Image (tube, rainbow, N blue to C red):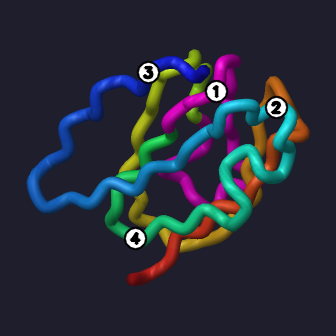
Amino acid sequence: MPPAPPAPTPVPTGQVTANVYILPGAIDLGPNAFGDEAIVIYKGERMRWRNFDGAEHNLVTDSPVLPEFMTTGLLAPGDEKSFDMSTLGTTKVHCTIHPQMVGTLIVKER
């Protein structure tokens, strides 16, 4: 059973937070470690990575097109890290510890 999720980080009034989950069992899920579709964030939203897996992960982008998010840094089970996304673009993402965990991150206009 995954650890209990941490208490949500307070969000400034009016700012939308889009949660991105590292799913339980993510290491074995490979390209579905973050779900079975691309991660879509809208420009101006806060993207919050939440680790619901039982292992540590470090998510990074494969290209510098989204400068607000380059790496989560080490996320222990239950940890989270947020980024305010203001640049439009698309990049692949992966875990540096478990390179089979891959996904696509898209930031677009609403």
Q: Residues within 10 Å of mark 2 (few under 14, many from 20)?
A: many
Which percent across, then down, holds residue 70? 60, 43
N-term mark: 1 or 3: 3
Q: Secondary structure at mark 4?
A: loop
Q: Residue shown at 55%/68% (left/top)?
A: 40
The residue range painted magenta reads: 50-71
Which percent across, then down, holds residue 98? 84, 29
The answer to the question of whether label 2 and label 1 lie on touching residues, with beta carbons closer than 8 A, is yes
N-term mark: 1 or 4: 4
For mark 2, what is the residue?
27
Q: Secondary structure at mark 2?
A: helix
Mark identifier at residue 53: 1
Q: Amino acid at mark 4?
A: Lys
Mark identifier at residue 43: 4
Calculate the distance from the C-alpha at mark 1 to the C-alpha at mark 4. 27 Å
N-term mark: 2 or 3: 3
N-term mark: 3 or 4: 3
